[in-house]
Image: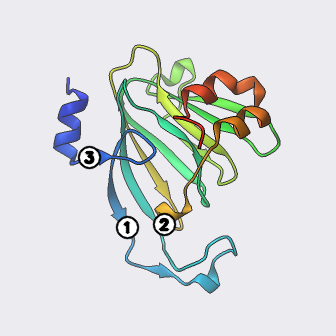
Amino acid sequence: MLTAEQLITLLGLEPHPEGGYYRETYRSDEIIGKGALPERYTRNRSCGTAIYYLLAPETFSAIHRIKTDEIYHFYLGDPVELVQLLPDGSGCNVMLGNDIAAGAQVQTVVSREAWHGSRLAEGGNYALLGTTVAPGFEFADVEIGRRSDLIRRYPSFRDTIVALTRHEC
């Protein structure tokens, strides 16, 4: 069985600003003009993008949101807890993994309006995921959640919010 370090090397992954490791694997060369996009986009966009994303025990994906729906794909490794905090003040936890009979999902969609973050399930060694975004992802679209604001809005998720935020921004 491969290790996280081997996968990082074999796949050419780099540290991701939100946490974990990643490599963009696809960026469409077709462009959607700003005028054809919803107002939330301030410039032209690639039609779509995809990445590999790896979580290891010492990493997590900080709670954030982007301007586009994001499709998560589970490839291999240990289960991943994905929290989604929804605009109406509710939230949910999705377990990404290969034990479908136990309720794990191999693919899930996070709405552009949802705050979300993820971490390995307890005891996990690594998980290799992917995400797909259309129109394409741009780092300028990322909004990192402020711990105090998220706790105030989603008090029942306090412990998860503390675990998936680095510090007060």
Along the line of sight, the residue nearer the viewer: 21 or 167 = 167
Percent position (x, y) of residue 26? Answer: 35, 62
Task: Give the amino acid type for the residue marked by disc 2 in the picture.
Answer: Gly
**Where, quadrant-wise, is the N terminus in this rendering?**
top left
| Disc nearer the start of the sequence (3/2) | 3
- Which tag is nearer the camera, tag 3 or tag 2? 3
Say whether marks 1 and 3 touch (CB < 8 Å).
Answer: no
Image coordinates for residue 44, horizontal then vertical, percent: 52, 80
**SS at mark 3 in the image:** loop
Viewer-proximal residue among 124 and 64 = 64
Q: Nearer the viewer, mark 1 or mark 3?
A: 3
Q: Which mark is residue 27?
A: 1
Kindly tell me whether residue 16 is visible in this rendering. yes
The mark nearer the N terminus, 2 or 1, is 1
* The disc label shown at residue 120, or none: none
Q: Which residue is mark 3?
A: 13
Q: Would residue 137 be seen by someone viewing this image from the given angle? A: no
Q: Secondary structure at mark 1?
A: strand
User: Vertical placement of 61 versus 133: above or below?
Assistant: above
x%, y% of residue 152?
78, 34
In the rendered image, which quarter is residue 34 located in? bottom right
Using residue 86 as the reference point, say whether residue 134 is left or right of it. left
Label 2 residue SS: loop
Mark 3–mark 2 distance (CA, rounded to whole Å): 19 Å
Mark 3: amino acid = Leu
Q: CA distance from mark 2 to mark 1?
A: 7 Å
Q: Residue at x 37, y 26 (%)?
A: 58
Quarter of the figure with residue 29 = bottom left
Residue ranking furthest to the right: 88
Crowd rating for badge 2 (residues with CA inside 10 Å; few <14, some 14–19, many 20+): many
